[in-house]
Amino acid sequence: MRYLLVDGHSIIFAWPELRKIHSRRSGAGRDELIRRLTQYQDASGVFVVLVFDGRGAETSDVTEPGGIQVLYSGAGVTADSVIERLCARYGEEHDLTVATDDHMEQQTALTFGASAISSEILRQLVDDAGSNLQKRLKRLKRDNR
């Protein structure tokens, strides 16, 4: 199984439209990123784990059934360190890709056997998956006439 580990705030601040939404209401920026990554997971079959910095004393998981896995790091722990621990633990046995613009985090992911992509590459993957899904749906609709 393929996994995509996403550094949530790195992506929010790299994508101008998400940064704008986030500046008005931070929860709305997170919600929009979750929505887009859920669509990506549905269209691509890649399991998405989205990690945000701190929310409470311990790392928490707020996964919705059928949705992506959303983790919030605990107090004093960064999203980067959660992603790095996941890479260290699972990088050799699973197909992991880390999406972040943090070059140090990318290097750490590579060290543990994961792949790393930038926020722009992630945007292309998300956009392409959505386009491909729309094409498949149109073809199915046409074929079922």
Image (cartoon, rainbow, N blue to C red):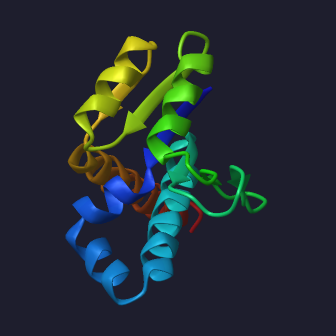
Q: Residue 128 versus residue 21: which sits nearer the camera?
A: 21
Q: Is residue 122 left or right of residue 96?
A: left
Q: Is residue 121 left or right of residue 50?
A: left
Q: Is residue 34 left or right of residue 113?
A: right
Q: Residue at x 56, y 58 (%)?
A: 54
User: Picture coordinates of residue 19 (x, y %)?
Assistant: 28, 73
Q: Residue at x 42, y 87 (%)?
A: 25
Q: Quadrant of the C terminus?
A: bottom right
Q: Residue at x 49, y 29 (%)?
A: 84
Give the farthest residue toward the front: 76
User: Picture coordinates of residue 100 (x, y %)?
Assistant: 33, 43
In this rendering, the answer to whether 54 lies above or below 89 is below
User: Picture coordinates of residue 114 (x, y %)?
Assistant: 43, 20
Q: How many marks?
A: 0
In this rendering, the answer to whether 62 lies above or below 90 is below
User: Picture coordinates of residue 47 (x, y %)?
Assistant: 60, 41
**Quadrant in the rendering for residue 21:** bottom left
Q: Residue at x 46, y 74 (%)?
A: 32
Q: Is residue 68 left or right of residue 18?
A: right
Give the farthest residue toward the right: 65
**Quadrant in the rendering for residue 121:** top left
